[in-house]
Image (tube, grey):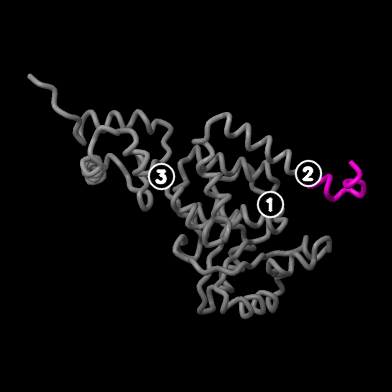
Amino acid sequence: MSTSAPTAGTDFYRSLAENMQNGEEVSIRQIYALFPRDNRKTVSWRVHKLVQQGRLQKTGHGYYALQSLARNSAAGYGYMQKETQEIYDIVAGYPFEFYVTGMDALVGELPHVPERHPALLVVEEGGMKDILDALGGRGFIALTEKDRRLLEGSGLKDRAEAIVMKGKDFGLSAENIAHKEQGFVDLYYAVTRMGYGVSIPELSRIYRSMQRNRSLSKENMKRAARARGIGLEISWLAEMDKAPEKTIEFMIHQMRTDRDAQSRQHSPTGDLA
């Protein structure tokens, strides 16, 4: 009896599963590359059948995983710190798009949860002034990204209870709480651009936790990053695990070289070398 060609229920699935053992999602292009001898339409049909059978999960446009990623919705209102709940309740009384994001959206992914942290809030541009006035009127110190730059080094910056950022895309949120991909991207932005009080090692541990728990859809994370204007660096972060070791080694060396060059350029004696 002749051996049948791989099908969605047998060899194709086993071969696909062997290349997805770490649980991370893969793109349809990566799946095509795994079966270079097969017609792309045939591969697409097999993938479609696996999705219908529930053996493969579609996690984003053109992305798939063997199992459903851990629900990328946040744990919910009841798990946010009390101060953030109070801020949420105030903002919910206004007719503006908003979502709570950052650490309050990442409960379950945080190796260490500080007793208190400023709430991160994203609000549509047209509602920024009303929301800031409302929070201030209720006694909360609420700052924007611009405020934090102007108040750099001041005590007021460190006493902020809410950081309010402008937003346009509210699709990666549910019940006004960011999905985990959006929550991480906003937290990353706040840490790297606004001096938000989370260390870089801690930010890295949060990201690794999300990878282990399969709480990340790369497609959604890239979408969140594009909306925040940091698409290139988040795409690099999302695909870094695919880069060859020598590529990573080169990138680290290049970053150190560039940093040294910048230091010399800003040194009072830099032009005397």
User: For the residue labelled by badge 1, is the local secondary structure a helix, a strand or a loop?
Assistant: loop
Q: Callout 2: helix, strand or loop? A: helix
Task: Give the image quarter of residue 46.
Answer: top left
| Mark nearer the N terminus (2 vs 1) | 1
Q: Secondary structure at mark 3?
A: loop
Depth order, front residue of 52/261: 261
Residue 271 falls within the magenta-colored stretch: yes
Q: Which comes before the other along the chain, label 3 or label 2?
A: 3
Residue 225 sits above or below residue 69 on the image: below
Position of 37 compared to 141: left or right?
A: left
Q: Amino acid at mark 1?
A: Glu
Residue 81: x and y in percent read 61, 57
Q: In the picture provided, is 49 more to the left or to the right than 156? A: left
* Alpha carbon distance from label 2 to label 1: 40 Å
Q: On the rendered image, what quadrant is the C terminus found in?
A: top right
Label 3 packing within 10 angstroms: few (<14), some (14-19), many (20+): some
Percent across and percent down for residue 220 are 45, 53
Check residue 115 in the rendering and tell me which mark sits there, or answer none: 1
Q: Which residues are magenta?
A: 262-273
Q: Amino acid at mark 2?
A: Ala
What numbered label is drawn on residue 261? 2
- The verdict on residue 181 being magenta is no
Q: How many marks?
A: 3
